[in-house]
Amino acid sequence: MVERKIEVGISPSLMCGNSFLQGEYIQTLNKLEISWYHIDIMDGHFVPNIGLNLNFIRDLRKLTEKLIEVHLMCTAPLDWIEKLLALGVDAISFHIEASHAPIRCLNLIREKGALAGIALSPATPPERLDFLFDYLDYVTLMGVEPGFEGQNFLPQTFKKIERTRHLIKTHQSEIFIQVDGGVDLDIGKKLIDSGADILVGGVPTIFMDNDLKGNYEKFSSLFTTP
């Protein structure tokens, strides 16, 4: 079973890398202190794009002992959860906007020993989490509209993190906040100051070139810089 409390830090989004270099990426990232691998699964319905798939996750699980976290951008998360857990995924977040039975989904994830998360699109208020805190381990706040990389970060995310952090304290919860989308180094520091625990790293931070180790070190320094 995954520890309920994980270290704050960085989650590389493998969808943002060059598809032909994924093996090299994993060899490098396995040596670094990342929080977990962030895997986007999209069904072409909830968002107009297709992301990584079950075969990719099956192969990744053979290559790493690091935690694997899946961000479901799908209209029917229940159709995916058991398949993902059977592959050894350690954490799953799904969109509250896509689920008619979020408690059932969260319970299913936790029953199998994985961490259970809810993802919120930019226009979804954090108050939607009000009746879910007893079933949650983390929340993924989108800094862009879900579905495509390369979008500009939405600045209202800073205030949303603060509101989410306030709700967490009000509910005396220990869930952590992950922010996904549009993060660069300058934005990343402001996100941490606003209360974010994990930052998903894409092209502007981890995969801008082939120097993954150097990019990771610059990005991770945000968590230790006053």
Image (cartoon, rainbow, N blue to C red):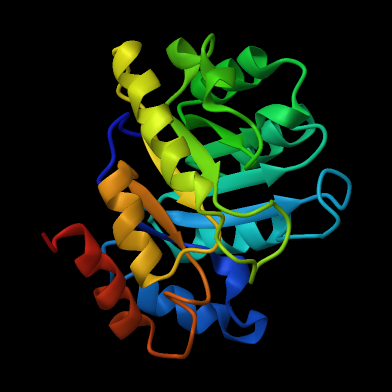
Q: In this view, does 126 lie above or below 185?
A: above
Residue drawn at (86%, 56%), measured in percent from left and top? 48
Foreground of the two, 192 or 5: 192
Residue drawn at (35%, 11%), measured in percent from left and top? 171
Q: In this view, does 220 lie to the left or right of 124?
A: left
Res. 105 visible in picture: yes
Residue drawn at (82%, 60%), measured in percent from left and top? 49
Foreground of the two, 61 or 144: 144
State which quarter of the image contains the N terminus: top left
Q: Where is residue 45 in the image (x, y as percent from the top left)?
A: 89, 46
Q: Is residue 76 left or right of residue 172?
A: right
Q: Is residue 128 above or below residue 74?
A: above
Res. 1 visible in picture: no
Q: Is residue 139 left or right of residue 171?
A: right
Image label count: 0
Q: Position of residue 123 (x, y in %)?
A: 66, 37
Residue drawn at (67%, 27%), measured in percent from left and top? 96
Foreground of the two, 201 or 170: 170
Q: In this view, does 205 lie above or below 99?
A: below
Q: In this view, does 101 lie above or below 92?
A: above
Q: Is residue 116 left or right of residue 2?
A: right
Q: Residue furthest left?
A: 226
Q: Where is residue 126 in the image (x, y as percent from the top left)?
A: 53, 26
Q: Residue furthest bottom?
A: 210
State which quarter of the image contains the C terminus: bottom left
Residue 21, quarter of the rendered image = bottom right
Q: Where is residue 196 in the image (x, y as percent from the top left)?
A: 34, 44
